[in-house]
Image (cartoon, grey):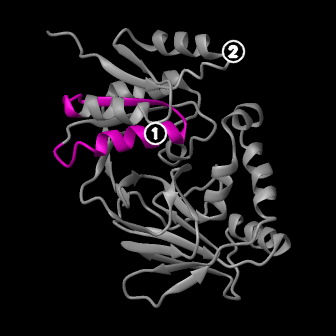
Amino acid sequence: MSPAPPVPVIFNPSARSAQAESRIDELKALSDRIVLHPTSQAGDARDIAASLAAAGAPIIVAAGGDGTVNEVVNGIASAGPSCPSALGLLPSGTMNVFAMDLGLPSDQMDECWAVIERGTSRSIDLWRANDSYFVQLAGAGLDASIIASTTWESKKKLGPLSYLLSGLRTLQQPAPLLTIRAPGRDPITGTVALIGNGRSYGGPFRLFPDASFDDGKLDVVVMKYHGIAEFLKLSLSVMSGQFATDGSVLTFQTPELTISAEGHVPFEADGELSGSVPVHIRHAGFPLRVLV
């Protein structure tokens, strides 16, 4: 019997973190099949995954948070519909929303590695926003502006609290006016547009309760707010699943949409800054296989 093939694991060693060496040791201890591919700058994980996918790697593992996962997904997707690579996950970042929605435990490396070794996969919808891909969520307006203004140092020091502090600063700026267009609907205006492939947003919040990874549709939440007080009131209601009925929050499902605005408005995909609007979001035309 031939030996089991090596498994490439792409990870950010967080060179500025005192825990970097212990994290490397933890990954190596999982299996002697693991071949580590550390990154040193933004875009490395995408490039490494693209190279591995083009070479026909059967499994490509992302070890990190949603940002690392998004880069690896984009690398795999660049190989097109004939790519044989399945995505494996070792969630260990600031945010692990995608892995959580798939039922994988964060920071439980042994359990997640067992999932990878078992080799059971499911096909999930892969979405394209202009020229990049995402699997969990996307957004334009406030949430993308928060991501744009949250520094790496702040995330490492404060974790998810860093986003809250950036949000309070961003809310002091004028809100953009977005226009959202979807098939079969009149144009919709709002100040925030959130798009879900999975059910969760920002951690445990089930912002998209009807979403499914394999229904060919995106769940969209459009909010209109004026000022900090109104936004906080809307956010509390949305995060608790009690959507406002006064027209300030609109939800719908669609297979495709475009978002535009006057001026520069950031856009995020899977919690990572991904350019700015206008953006056209549609199905990639082929699924992504994920080990679950």
Q: Secondary structure at mark 1?
A: helix
Residue 37 showing in the rendered view: yes
For image coordinates 62% across by 78% down, the residue present is 177
Q: Is residue 24 above or below residue 63?
A: above
Q: Amino acid at mark 2?
A: Ala
Can you identify the residue that label 1 sits on? 69
Percent x, y of residue 140: 57, 65
Query: Which residue is more in the foreground, 102 or 251?
Result: 251
Give left or right: position of 168 versus 22.
right
Question: Number of numbered discs present?
Answer: 2
Query: Bounds of the magenta span?
Result: 54-82
Distance from the alpha carbon under mark 1 to that under mark 2: 23 Å
The 10 Å Cα crowd at callout 2, few under 14, some 14 to 19, many 20 or more, is few
The 10 Å Cα crowd at callout 1, few under 14, some 14 to 19, many 20 or more, is many
Percent x, y of residue 254: 41, 75
Query: Which residue is more in the foreground, 123 or 163?
Result: 163
For image coordinates 42% across by 32% down, the residue present is 45
Give left or right: position of 172 versus 252.
right
Query: Which residue is more in the foreground, 99 or 222?
Result: 222
Kindly identify which numbered label has been placed on residue 18: 2
Residue 292 showing in the rendered view: no
Percent x, y of residue 242: 70, 73
